[in-house]
Amino acid sequence: MISTVIPLLNEEGNLELLHQKLTAALTQLNQPYEIIFINDGSTDNSPQILEALFERDPAVRVIHFHQNFGKTAGLVAGFRHSRGDVIITLDADLQDDPAEIPKLLAKLEEGYDLVAAWRHDRQDPIDKTWPSKIFNRVVSKFSQLNLHDFNCGFKVYRRAVTEQIPLYSDFHRFVPVLAAGKGFRITEEKVQHHPRYSGVSKYGAGRAIRGFLDFITVLFLTTYLKHPLRLFGTIGLLTFGLGTLIELYLAGLWLLRVAAGFDIGPIGTRPLFLVGILAMILGIQLFSTGLLGEMLRYFTFRPEQEYTIKKILEREETNPRVPVVN
Ligand code: UDP
Ligand code: MG
């Protein structure tokens, strides 16, 4: 089965046509499918339209949120309630073209776990496309995952991916990074992109700073989370060591001068003295942060977070607890 997951907020002008185009694309695949709409607290007519679609089409499922929780929450709910082995996500505003679905699915069949659509000819205003270009370059550089377009809502996934990546806050922008961090195979495929069919964009300028902070979190989660003390402890020890050296140097200098009969005054007034003290305190704080990180990991330990399984070979009757005795 194929599940289509569509988070939406106030998209009344798009839903009918989206449903039509999706149905046309999905029926061509000759496979069972479902279309899951997640109404993320819409205040327009979207809920009524979704309910009418539900009455008409047995393939449609609708999840109404109590209020607006954001696109990421919509995706999470859609993933959890989906039944397909393959999951397709797309935006509700018809910027993503359902006719491109077969192309993405074909790419997935080549052995990938996640195929991200690449809007190579993006139809958005310049205040969106330019920040997005920078965003993609930076994320690509730091995550060592070479994609041109991380944040497109149009993607196809194997179920294992949607079940095993932790998504919260606005992490929908970093799904490929999080999936790559778990060892999944990721690629991209060029698609047609269209201007928004009806309604207005839900994302304004505020997303730049939020996106940046989320990215720091994601980088941290995918790279350093496993050993917080190794990162913070190392920097902490180095900083503390530097501070200690500075103070030892000052103390040594002072003793030498006093021994030589100079009256040089207290070392406490030298700027270097303060730098050394600051470095020592900072070092201890960094080290403690690492320790706290380790404690958090210990107390929130969940085995399934430690690995992702690609495949298990085993027999039905296998029971490792009972040794075979002849
Ligand atoms: N969306 C949502 N919840 C939100 C904001 C957006 O479900 O809080 C949906 C929106 O309805 C659309 C998709 O996320 O289906 C992408 O939003 P939008 O088209 O406004 O973003 P843009 O393409 O302008 O970046
Ligand atoms: Mg859009």
Image (cartoon, rainbow, N blue to C red):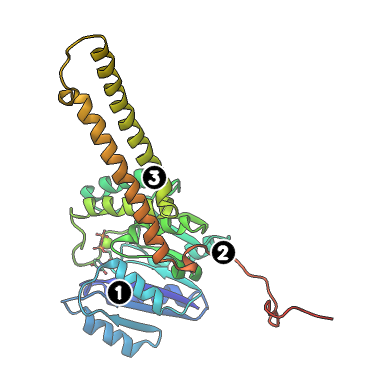
Q: Which residue is mark 2?
A: 109
Report the mark closest to the observer, 3 or 2: 3
Q: Nearer the viewer, residue 2 or 217?
A: 217
Q: Residue 91: x, y in percent?
A: 32, 66
Q: Residues within 10 Å of mark 2 (few under 14, many from 20)?
A: few
Query: Mark 1 vs mark 3: which is more N-terminal?
Result: 1
Question: In the image, is 79 to the left or to the right of 265?
Answer: right
Instruction: Tell me the residue at 15%/18% (across/down).
Output: 265
Q: Residue 38: x, y in percent?
A: 30, 76
Residue 21 visible, this orientation: no
Instruction: Tell me the residue at 21%/48% (across/down).
Output: 127
Q: In the picture shown, does residue 106 fall above or below 61?
A: above
Residue 228 visible, this orientation: yes
Q: Which residue is mark 1?
A: 17
Q: Residues within 10 Å of mark 3 (few under 14, many from 20)?
A: many
Circle 1: element type: helix
Identity of the amino acid at label 3? Gly
Tell me the CA gap for discs 1 and 2: 28 Å
Identity of the amino acid at label 2? Glu
Say whether marks 1 and 2 touch (CB < 8 Å).
no
Q: Which residue is mark 3?
A: 233
Tell me the CA gap for discs 1 and 3: 56 Å
Q: In the picture shown, does residue 292 fall above or below 77?
A: above
Query: Mark 3 vs mark 2: which is more N-terminal?
Result: 2
Say whether marks 3 and 2 touch (CB < 8 Å).
no
Question: In the image, is 107 to the left or to the right of 299?
Answer: right
